[in-house]
Image (cartoon, rainbow, N blue to C red):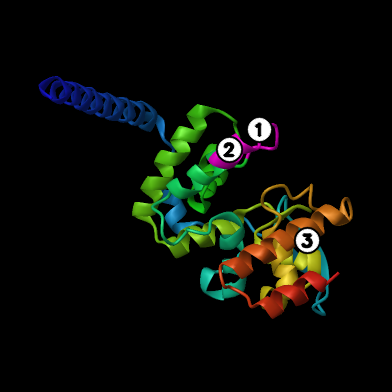
Amino acid sequence: MRYLWYGFLGLFSIGILGLIAGAAVVIGVINYYEQDLPDYSALKTYDPPIVTRLYAGDGRLMAEYAQEKRVFVPINSIPDLVKNAFIAAEDKNFYQHEGVDPAAIARAALSNFLHTGARMKGASTITQQVAKNFLLGNERSYSRKIREVILAYRMEKAMSKDHLLELYLNQIYLGARAYGVGAASLQYFNKSLDELSVAEIAYLASLPKAPNNYNPERDYAAAIDRRDYVIDRMLEDNYITPAQAAEAKASR
């Protein structure tokens, strides 16, 4: 019995030392990568470039000038269903996590393990996507991912959830040179956000992952499949009713 006790103490000590070593590594990594983090303070008062429009004397639109089609929409003017559709599709725990979602990371890791060879699933939160889109770019590297995680945690401490969501919904590229939900709503449906149907909202929320892949003019079946996936997520999270989901899926 005494030998068993000593063995248990030995394993326990090794475990504690392992935890200490792991914590030291994490702290060292954070200290290394936080030295050259970009300044995110400007995002607190973000003023995006928007479309410049030239009108004739009688009010007719003559021309538009912009490298990016963008219509800035304040968060309080974005319909709840639009916000909820993007949350359901991209980051269901957005209002619960602190910048990074451990549960989503675990789900993605398990899915990638079980479906080896398929396109790997990610687990980036909306906050991480804001950090990437505004500050870090699309470089595929562990260095960029680590900095993205650190920035996400810090941005969550410095800004409200609603402000981060506002940044995301007005910056995200949704295809056809449209940046942000306001511009995309006009580009795809010639409607304002409050005029969109459930099916149209779900389609917009389907685009962030790969807007070119889900362009209905290029691949109609893929666009509908992805839209229906978002409808399912909205139903699962109780943002729409079964009747609304069925009606939206029937829309073509």
Task: Tell me which corner region of the image, top left, top right, bottom left or bottom right, holds residue 190.
Answer: bottom right
Q: Which residues are magenta?
A: 110-120
Say whether residue 61 is left or right of residue 144: right
Q: Which mark is residue 64?
A: 3
Q: Which residue is mark 1?
A: 116
Q: Which mark is residue 137?
A: 2
Q: CA distance from mark 3 to mark 2?
A: 27 Å
| Magenta stretch encompasses residue 44 | no
Residue type at mark 3: give it: Glu
The residue located at (77%, 77%) in the rendering is 247
Q: CA distance from mark 3 to mark 1?
A: 47 Å
Label 3–label 2 contact, CB within 8 A: no
Determine whether the residue tagged by mark 3 lies in a helix, strand or loop.
strand
Residue 242 drawn at (x, y percent): 67, 76
Say whether residue 192 is left or right of residue 122: right
Q: Quadrant of the N terminus?
A: top left
